[in-house]
Image (tube, rainbow, N blue to C red):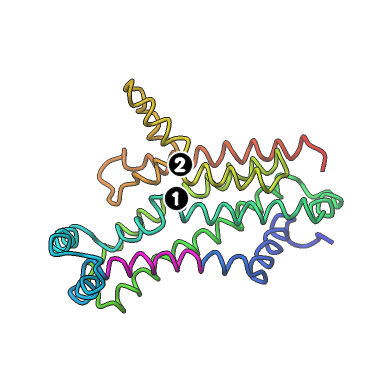
Amino acid sequence: RWKGAPAMLNLLRMDLYRMRKGKAAYICLGIILATITLVYFLLFLMLTPTGQAAASRLGMMDFVEMEEAKALFREINLLLVFRQSNMDGGFFALVLTIYFTIFVCADFKNGFIKNIMSVHVNRWKYIGSKILSFAILDIIYLAASYLFTFLVNLLMGGNIPVTGFSSVLFFLAQAWVLTMAMLALVLLVCMLTRSIAAGILAAVLVSSGVIVTLLNALLGLFHVNGWLKYTLYFSLQDAPEVYQSPADLAGFAVGIVFLIVYMVIAGTALSKKDI
């Protein structure tokens, strides 16, 4: 049954097959790309002469706002557009973590996990297969969404300056590690509760940064909010685009530590609870 390749690789192949054959992975990517398109369309109206003329005719912008838009145009680059469209506000992470929640909890809902455990597959391998399958999907989503941003800019006339490849790669690598840690947190919640509702709530809270943002505002009144920069949400939002010193690697360290901690707790929770 599970002979040949290691059990985790078999599980990984099964998870990837489910993604490839299902519609959800494509729908989620489509939502991310549609958001980028919408943001770029708004930028087109604000930052290009043709767009400004159209916006002016529609009453969306006046002369003062056009001048402000021109000043803004001189300060942005393509990576900033990409970040503002779906990364810094947590939209990318929200879509990914909600899909992950539904994907994982479906195993409990349809009884698939009982079939897996009935053939004595190590439960840690189950955790590993879920993380690895979405690590692959995460890379695909990040690469596809940035490439899409680049192509949209190209089709619109290349009005926004392209960011250097090293800066793009440095940021995307941080984004990948940090969003994987967010997925591990959601996995932990799913293993503890077996509930799609609880998993989605955790996905919304961790990706949107609601709790840490409120804490930042409250603790900022007493100047004791410095430690919050090491949370997943703020590490992603404030991720540097250029490596200048070891301090710029903090996002990688935060993501890796949380990823390992949440995976260990999730694996322990799955091992201790009856299926």
Residue stretch in magenta: 30-44
Q: Amino acid at mark 1?
A: Gly
Disc on res. 151 = none
* Callout 2–callout 1 Cβ contact below 8 Å: yes
Q: Please state the horizontal and vertical placement of residue 46, each as a whole percent of the image.
A: 23, 66
* Magenta stretch secondary structure, dominant: helix
Mark 2 or mark 1: whose residue is earlier in sequence:
1
- Return the residue found at the far front: 59
Q: Locate residue 37: give its quadrant.
A: bottom left
The secondary element bearing badge 2 is classed as loop
Q: Per the image, is 162 magenta?
A: no
Disc on res. 90 = 1
Which residue is found at the position 47% from the left and 42% from the top?
255
The secondary element bearing badge 1 is classed as loop
Q: Which quadrant is home to the N terminus?
A: bottom right
Q: Please state the horizontal and vertical placement of residue 113, each as a whole percent of the image.
A: 79, 52
The 10 Å Cα crowd at callout 2, few under 14, some 14 to 19, many 20 or more, is some
Q: Per the image, is 42 magenta?
A: yes
Q: Locate residue 146: give its quadrant.
A: bottom left
Q: Amino acid at mark 2?
A: Gly
Q: Which quadrant is home to the C terminus?
A: top right
Q: Locate residue 82: give its quadrant.
A: bottom left
Q: Nearer the viewer, residue 55 or 124?
A: 55
Q: In the displayed structure, does residue 256 sit left or right of residue 85?
A: right
Query: Is residue 125 depicted above or below 230 in this figure?
Result: below
Which residue is found at the position 44% from the left and 35% from the top?
212
Residue that mark 2 sits on: 209
Q: In the displayed structure, does residue 81 sit left or right of residue 178?
A: left
- Return the residue found at the far top: 222
Which residue is found at the position 54% from the left and 42% from the top?
259
The 10 Å Cα crowd at callout 1, few under 14, some 14 to 19, many 20 or more, is many
Q: CA distance from mark 2 to mark 1?
A: 7 Å
